[in-house]
Image (cartoon, rainbow, N blue to C red):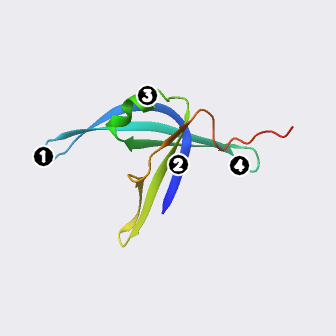
Amino acid sequence: MITFFIGQLEEVRPNNRKNKETGVVTTSLEATVTFETKDKEGYLIKSTEQIQMEMSDFKTLSESKGKFIVIPYLTINTKNGTYTFPSDSLSYQIFDKNPFELKKPL
């Protein structure tokens, strides 16, 4: 199943991880994305995620800070549990404004 995480891209930073067994260091990109909305009573709800992305996207994402990003997620169910991670088969999309922001009636 494909779902989407939508939010404002707040930060982009390289993230180094060292494999304890092999000692090999891998670098990935950590994007901080915040989704913001209000509930039925008008109270603010925020959800911030640290999302691992490909280092090849560093320049594009760094230039997109403050914009809105839509990241496709793949969810799989196995006998060991449910796993959700960014999809390799679909690419993210960048928007200048929140794609969920409704236009106010005239």
Look at label 4 and name its amino acid.
Asp
Of the two numbered discs 1 and 2 on the same chain, state the one appearing first in sequence.
2
Q: Is residue 35 left or right of residue 81?
A: right
Look at label 2 and name its amino acid.
Phe
What SS does tag 1 mark?
A: loop
Q: Residues within 10 Å of mark 2 (few under 14, many from 20)?
A: some
Callout 2 touching callout 3 (CB < 8 Å): no
What SS does tag 2 mark?
A: strand
Q: Pinpoint residue 49: horizontal percent, then vertical percent.
A: 48, 43
Q: Residues within 10 Å of mark 1 (few under 14, many from 20)?
A: few
Q: Report the mark closest to the observer, 1 or 2.
A: 2
Look at label 1 and name its amino acid.
Thr
Q: CA distance from mark 1 to mark 4?
A: 47 Å
- The residue under the point 14% across, 42% down is 23
Q: Pinpoint residue 32: horizontal percent, then vertical percent.
A: 46, 37
Q: Which is nearer the eye, 44 or 12? A: 12
Which residue is tagged 2? 5
Of the two numbered discs 3 and 1 on the same chain, state the one appearing first in sequence.
1
Q: CA distance from mark 2 to mark 3?
A: 18 Å
Which residue is tagged 1? 22
Of the two numbered discs 3 and 4 on the same chain, state the one appearing first in sequence.
4
Q: CA distance from mark 3 to mark 1?
A: 31 Å
Quadrant housing residue 42: top right
Look at label 3 and name its amino acid.
Ser
Which residue is tagged 4? 39
Of the two numbered discs 2 and 3 on the same chain, state the one appearing first in sequence.
2
- Extreme residue in the left direction: 22
The circle drawn on residue 62 is 3
Of the two numbered discs 2 and 4 on the same chain, state the one appearing first in sequence.
2
- The residue under the point 59% across, 32% down is 96
- Extreme residue in the top direction: 63
